Image (tube, helix red, strand yellow):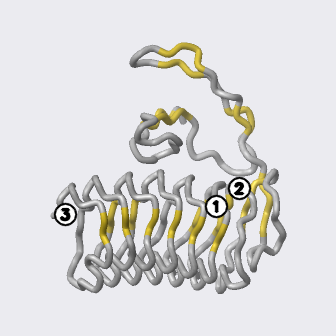
Amino acid sequence: TIPDSVTYLGEAFQNCTNLASVTLPSGLTSLAGYNFYGTKITSITIPAGVTSIGPADFGACSLLTSIVLPSGLTSIAASAFVNCTSLTSITIPSAVTSIGDSAFLGCTALSSITLPGSLTSLGTSTFSGCTGLASVYFQGNAPTASSNTFTSVTAPGYRASDATGWSSPFYGLTMTAQNRPTVTTPTSASIAATTATLGGNVTAAGDTSLTAVGVVYAPTTTNANPQLNGTSVTNLTSS
């Protein structure tokens, strides 16, 4: 058990080949690199205070199937998840601005990836060899990338029709523009200490199937930008 007083980890469990499970302390703020490289962990939740995944922190974790990233995460460093061959899905938080070189290289089980609107840069070979990808979704404007960011990826790419900077193909991805859902602006009808009534309606679904309609909220002190299933988020899903 790692004490809650620990705030920094660097190369902590690299090549501990029998390590299958770990719980990170709630006070952790820094993952500095190679912490779980080559271990047998299968799942892990990153604490809310961590803002970056360090170089190769989870590299070669071939049994890793799921990881929960905190909503305040802003960067994923080079080789962070390189050759995590059992990783089938990962939610990139909406605050992430950069994903480094080879971050997901060789993650052959990844079936889909959604990249947030905050993203401005993708590195060399970031998703190279992710041969299982069936779709790549971009929620914002075109990030910087390189000619081999998506090497061996044959999946189509999708981006919002009102986003800028795009070309097709985009570094090998054939891009399709899609209209976003149209939502009337939610306004507070009444707010009390423990209750609130909110307005707002989806008036058009756009070009994709809506998976949920409702309200999400979280305390500002723990998550100032709540999203579905995010850290400390309560989902009030109506459909």
* Crowd band around label 2 with a 10 angstrom C-alpha radius: few (<14), some (14–19), many (20+): many
Q: Is residue 33 above or below residue 191?
A: below
Q: Earlier in the sequence, mark 3 or mark 2?
A: 3
Image depth: mark 3 or mark 2 in front: 3
| Real-space CA distance between mark 3 and mark 1, rounded to the nearest whole angstrom | 32 Å
Q: Which residue sits at x=62%, y=57%?
A: 116
Q: Is residue 195 above or below residue 80?
A: above
| Real-space CA distance between mark 2 and mark 1, rounded to the nearest whole angstrom | 7 Å
Q: Which residue sits at x=26%, y=78%?
A: 13
* Crowd band around label 3 with a 10 angstrom C-alpha radius: few (<14), some (14–19), many (20+): few
Secondary structure state at the residue bearing disc 1: loop
| Numbered circle sitting on residue 89 | none
Residue 26 percent coordinates (x, y): 28, 53
Q: Which residue sits at x=37%, y=68%?
A: 31
Q: Earlier in the sequence, mark 2 or mark 1?
A: 1
| Real-space CA distance between mark 3 and mark 2, rounded to the nearest whole angstrom | 38 Å
Secondary structure state at the residue bearing disc 2: loop
Q: Is residue 185 above or below residue 69?
A: above
Residue 184 percent coordinates (x, y): 71, 29
Amino acid at circle 1: Leu
Which residue does the numbered mark 2 point to in the structure image? 140
Q: Which residue sits at x=48%, y=34%?
A: 217
Q: Is residue 220 above or below residue 206?
A: above
